[in-house]
């Protein structure tokens, strides 16, 4: 998807993209009800063994930390060839822009591109509301947060390390937004 920041009726922008024509979402969406696009950030399992309070009271349980944004609004689906070609070209250009030799839709044979366009449906989601939610151990005492940061930092994967950074930022008061 692409975010068109200066578009949309509520000043929140709009999302544009496409999905496979075979995907039933575009046929089952009710235009009278808002749709939602979910953007998942880092997430990680949090073991109670990282909590200092586990050793003091023992009354702790595992949990899951996460960060997510929901974009809600009316969605329009379309299969107009020119609009599809435009959105596919813009998506490709956006994702290829940092490559040394960027690929472009125009690099593929026209007949091939036309066949591919027949297999997709475009959409525009006018963002009416954006809701960010997170759980970053903000309900835990400082010593437990420090244990979570240390524990996540010792994990071997990038997701855990990204969550570690968010938990540390939240503990230091650098994370803006409202947690849930």
Image (cartoon, rainbow, N blue to C red):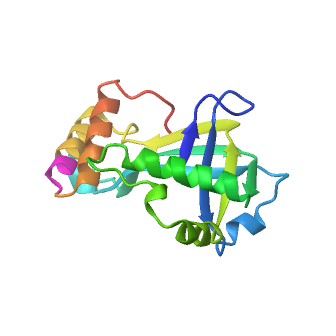
Q: Position of residue 16 (x, y in %)?
A: 62, 47
Q: Position of residue 151 (x, y in %)?
A: 19, 50
Q: Is residue 147 left or right of residue 83?
A: left
Pick out the residue farthest to the bottom: 22
- Tell me if I can see residue 7 in this picture: yes
Magenta part mainly helix, strand or loop?
Answer: helix
Q: Is residue 152 left or right of residue 78?
A: left
Q: Residue at x 37, y 52 (%)?
A: 43
- Residue 120 colored in magenta in the image: no
Q: Return the residue nearer the eye: 161 or 37.
A: 37
User: In which image quadrant can residue 135 be found?
Assistant: top left
User: In which image quadrant can residue 144 be found?
Assistant: top left
- Tell me if I can see residue 66 in this picture: no
Decide: is 135 above or below 106: above
Q: Is residue 15 left or right of residue 160?
A: right
Decide: is 121 above or below 102: below
Q: Residue at x 53, y 51 (%)?
A: 89
Q: Return the residue nearer the eye: 3 or 25.
A: 3
Q: Return the residue nearer the eye: 71 or 140.
A: 71
Pick out the residue farthest to the right: 32
Q: Which residues are magenta?
A: 151-155
Q: Return the residue nearer the eye: 79 or 102.
A: 102
Q: Position of residue 6 (x, y in %)?
A: 62, 28
Pick out the residue farthest to the front: 110
Decide: is 16 above or below 146: below
Q: Position of residue 169 (x, y in %)?
A: 30, 31
Q: Residue at x 22, y 42 (%)?
A: 149
- Residue 152 colored in magenta in the image: yes
Q: Residue at x 31, y 43 (%)?
A: 98
Q: Is residue 93 left or right of residue 148?
A: right
């Amino acid at each position: 998807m692409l975010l068109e920041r200066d578009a949309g009726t509520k000043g929140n922008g709009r999302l544009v993209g496409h999905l496979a024509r075979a995907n039933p979402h575009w046929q089952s969406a009710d235009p009278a009800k808002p749709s939602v696009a979910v953007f998942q950030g880092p997430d990680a399992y949090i073991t109670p063994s990282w909590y200092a309070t586990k050793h003091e009271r023992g009354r702790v349980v595992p949990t899951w930390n996460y960060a997510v944004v929901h974009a809600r609004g009316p969605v329009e689906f379309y299969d107009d060839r020119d609009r599809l070609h435009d959105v596919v070209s813009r998506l490709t250009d956006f994702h290829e822009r940092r490559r040394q030799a960027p690929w472009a839709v125009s690099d593929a044979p026209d007949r091939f591109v036309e066949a591919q366009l027949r297999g997709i449906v475009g959409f525009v989601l006018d963002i009416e509301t954006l809701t960010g939610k997170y759980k970053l151990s903000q309900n835990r005492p400082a010593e437990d947060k420090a244990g979570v940061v240390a524990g996540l930092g010792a994990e071997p994967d990038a997701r855990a390390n990204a969550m570690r950074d968010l938990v540390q930022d939240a503990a230091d008061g650098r994370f803006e937004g409202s947690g849930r």
